[in-house]
């Protein structure tokens, strides 16, 4: 796992192959399959490690406002994804494959539920938050990667570029949280 | 463009190469570079075609509520992305490269602005909406693709799976729109 995370961070997801991982560990590729039935399982374990680097907002937020907890969970998830190259892509592929720990979305759901929302609303809001987080961070990481590859022509700016990506991210989370607040006030 | 869209739809983005496109047109790859300086430019043109298939919500919505216009724009964008295999990935890569038409995000921004929001708020809200749309549809399309490749084990379900993806999408858009409504009522 440590070797795989190192390759991910140094070279990016497309270059994280079982062959390269085996070479970096000085073993035959077949030895890896003793631990992981396939590459998807390896990526799922990586995804779990990446999101597990989130600080424990749950515990710290016992007394905090539910909306602040949701904001803190979303920001912690963004930080964790940004900490590894292609982190958002590793996690979104894993979720699409139906693999990885349910904790990724469940922590968001618990923060929402503390606002008194029913289980179904909390789950759907957590899912919407997760899609927003993955969409946002995936864009940030693609920009970084294209920039480092030198494929962005000088002066090329995306219509989605932000001077302050963290503030733009928080603005989006605030809208989603605001939507929940509005639905609560209308009950 | 038509040949490229056909390859995209039949084989997916990873198999859309300049070489394959040239072969499908019975020309040398070098002939393509006369029209497109590189593959990125070709993908950007594809992205613009994909989002341009959106029906004109703008015109139809003159009398509609601004919030309904935003919902209609978001839904139209989702439909356009879903209409082509890997559509969300083509559009998100293009935006990350700083290429493609600003119309993709500007149409969302105009719908928001009709609610009386200032230019900066409209732009940021449109960007947040776009990240949500791309995150959501990209997940939907990855699920479809993994399913068609048979890499989803029987019974594998993502924690993000929805019985009704269109309703789950609309729920997320409603939260973002609700956040805008709340910020308006607090002004």
Image: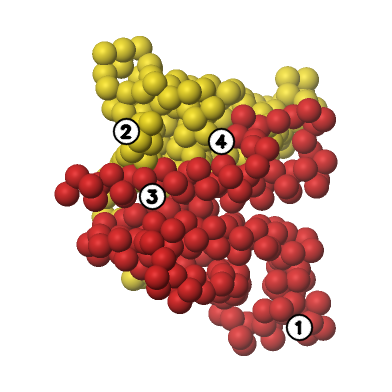
Chain colours: A yellow, B red
The residue marked by circle 4 belongs to what chain? A
Give the residue pinned by disc 2.
A185
- Whole-percent x, y for residue B174 in the image: 44, 46
Between discs 1 and 3, the one toward the N terminus: 1
Residues under labels 1 and 3: Cα distance?
Answer: 49 Å
Tell me, yes or no, whether the two marked residues, 3 and 4, touch with CB atoms within 8 Å.
no
Eyeballing the image, is A113 above or below B174? above
Q: Quadrant of the C terminus of chain A?
A: top left
Q: Residues within 10 Å of mark 2 (few under 14, many from 20)?
A: few
Q: Residues within 10 Å of mark 3 (few under 14, many from 20)?
A: many
Residues under labels 4 and 2: Cα distance?
Answer: 34 Å
Badge 3 marks a residue whose secondary structure is helix
Give the residue pinned by disc 3.
B177
Q: Are marks 3 and 4 on the same chain?
A: no
Tell me, yes or no, whether the two marked residues, 2 and 3, touch with CB atoms within 8 Å.
no
Q: Quadrant of residue A93?
A: top right
Q: Is residue B64 visible?
A: yes
Query: How many labels, in total?
Result: 4
Q: Nearer the viewer, mark 2 or mark 3?
A: 2
Q: Nearer the viewer, mark 4 or mark 1?
A: 4
The residue marked by circle 2 belongs to what chain? A
Give the residue pinned by disc 1.
B28
Residue placed most toward the observer, A69 or A156: A69
Q: Are marks 2 and 1 on the same chain?
A: no
Instruction: From the viewer's perspective, tell me whether residue A118 is left or right of residue B126.
Output: right
The residue marked by circle 1 belongs to what chain? B
Badge 4 marks a residue whose secondary structure is helix
Residue shown at the point (46%, 67%) measured from the top left: B104
Q: Nearer the viewer, mark 4 or mark 2?
A: 2
Residues under labels 3 and 4: Cα distance?
Answer: 27 Å
Give the residue pinned by disc 4.
A91
């Amino acid at each position: 796992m440590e070797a795989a995370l190192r390759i991910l961070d140094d070279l990016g997801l497309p270059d994280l192959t079982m062959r390269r991982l085996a070479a970096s560990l000085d073993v035959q590729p077949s030895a890896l399959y003793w631990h992981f039935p396939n590459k998807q399982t390896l990526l799922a374990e990586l995804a779990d490690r990446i999101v597990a680097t989130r600080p424990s907002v749950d515990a710290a937020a016992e007394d905090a406002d539910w909306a602040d907890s949701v904001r803190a969970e979303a920001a912690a998830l963004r930080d964790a994804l940004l900490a590894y190259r292609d982190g958002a892509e590793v996690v979104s592929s894993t979720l699409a494959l139906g693999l990885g720990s349910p904790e990724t979305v469940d922590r968001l759901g618990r923060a929402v539920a503390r606002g008194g929302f029913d289980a179904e609303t909390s789950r759907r809001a957590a899912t919407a938050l997760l899609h927003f987080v993955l969409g946002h961070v995936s864009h940030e990481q693609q920009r970084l990667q294209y920039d480092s590859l030198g494929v962005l022509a000088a002066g090329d700016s995306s219509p989605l570029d932000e001077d302050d990506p963290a503030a733009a991210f928080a603005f989006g989370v605030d809208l989603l949280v605001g939507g929940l607040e509005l639905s609560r006030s209308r009950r």
